[in-house]
Amino acid sequence: MNPFTSISRREMLSRAAGGFGAIALSAMLADTQSASASSGSADPLAPKQPHYPAKAKNVIFLFMSGGVSHVDSFDPKPQLTADHNKTLNVHNYRGHIGDFKQHFKKAQWDFRPRGESGIEVSDLFPHIGGMIDDIALIRSMTTDHIAHYEATLGMHTGSFSFARPSMGSWVSYGLGTENQNLPSFVVITGATPYARGQNWNNAFLPGCHQGLQVFPGATPIANMHRRAATNDLQSLELDLLREINQGNLQQSPQDDQLEARIKSFETAFGMQSEAPEVFDLSQETESTLAMYDLKPGDTTSFGWNCLVARRIVERGVRFVECIDVGSSNNWDDHGDMLNHGRLAKNVDKPIAGLLQDLKQRGLLDDTLVVWTTEFGRTPYMEEKDAAGRDHHPMVFSSWMAGAGMKKGVVHGASDEYGISVADKRVHVHDFHATILHLLGIDHTRLTFRHTGRDYRLTDVFGNVVHDILT
């Protein structure tokens, strides 16, 4: 064809559309090939080799919903106390840009040096403070959003705007699980947090990597006991169901939902034999229960969540999250910071007990414990002597303990009032990259192709915080 031959506008658009169609088809085929490769194993939850030797085998992720005040808990600010009720001007107030007159508000709990390290922790968390020599405390956390929904979503998925796979789902996808009778990712919460189930959703990852929600109470998991008259009868029923499903899967080999259902039936069958024992705390000693601030028969307190988390990770589950409260009656104390005291009393001793229990059993050597919230709270308020505090994403505190972590150290700092990061900023993506690193995962290499793009937990950002690692 003569390259200089003129063509009609209609023909040009037709060719252009064909070109775009070819591009779209190429992207779809690449996605299909990637999905096929990712599920090439007969068992998508089979244990996988990490990118490099891991220091942590499991993660217990403790999430305090609502925004814990850093200046009342883990970040002492003597200057804030000295300047209580003095005025300042801020240029970003509740997400609005301008010039706003505010008043400094001092901490409502005293800070004291704790442990041999002498790290200051407030009287809000005396029991966690007692374990500070086992903790790497980060005082320079920052996040991208001032609203609960988006900040909670970001802390769990790395995305502040769109539904993406949860961190637990990424860990399950990258490493599989060591116990085929239990899920690889478990979330223990009786309340619904901001962003709801998106916090433990698999999104575009294969469905078997979605987190299983466990409800504190008499029935932690529905249908935990078989309905068939005997184990043999149930096995026959499941064998027939598996045969039918496998036949359907051969006809639709890229049906991720069907593949996930097949795996869910297999996991459910295994759980009926193992899960009842996991949730039976009757064999735990009185001293162990006391460590978690638990009384015999208590199945609804945060201590129950923490003790069950320990029992789950020691059975090979990769990722366990404990959420203390939901999207109401939480740490979002705009009106009265004294509510922090009530909430801290529910979690302080159980969390310290979890660290102590893991340490005594030798489990802290390969279990990473992470404590965080979605953002901090303002060191100032509009009115003098205000009782509460507002949302504060610019800086807050989190901590890690256990496998691969330095002990009794502080990383980073906020300024003299706790308003912004002064040193060694740690973004949520850095936080996630560090967790994955301890599990032996390079966060830049743990990807999944979806809609023509390779996605990862840390988007296109994130650096491992090596200073807090051994």
Image: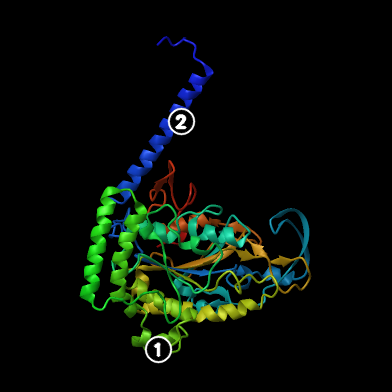
Front residue (pair 116, 410) = 410
Front residue (pair 119, 350) = 350
| Residue 416 appears anywhere in the view | no
Amino acid type assigned to the residue bearing label 1 in the image: Ser
The residue under the point 57% across, 71% down is 74
Quarter of image, res 469: bottom left
Counting from the top left corner in percent of width and height, residue 49 is at: 29, 56
Counting from the top left corner in percent of width and height, residue 177 is at: 31, 63
The residue under the point 61% across, 61% down is 395
Give yes or no for contact between labels 1 and 2 (Cβ–Cβ under 8 Å): no
| Residue 305 appears anywhere in the view | yes
How far is the residue under mark 1 from the one under mark 2?
67 Å
Q: Which residue is mark 2?
A: 20
Left/right placement of residue 442 relative to residue 344 reads: left
For the N terminus, the image quarter is: top left
For the C terminus, the image quarter is: bottom left
Q: Which residue is mark 1?
A: 287
Coloured how? Answer: rainbow
The residue under the point 46% across, 10% down is 5
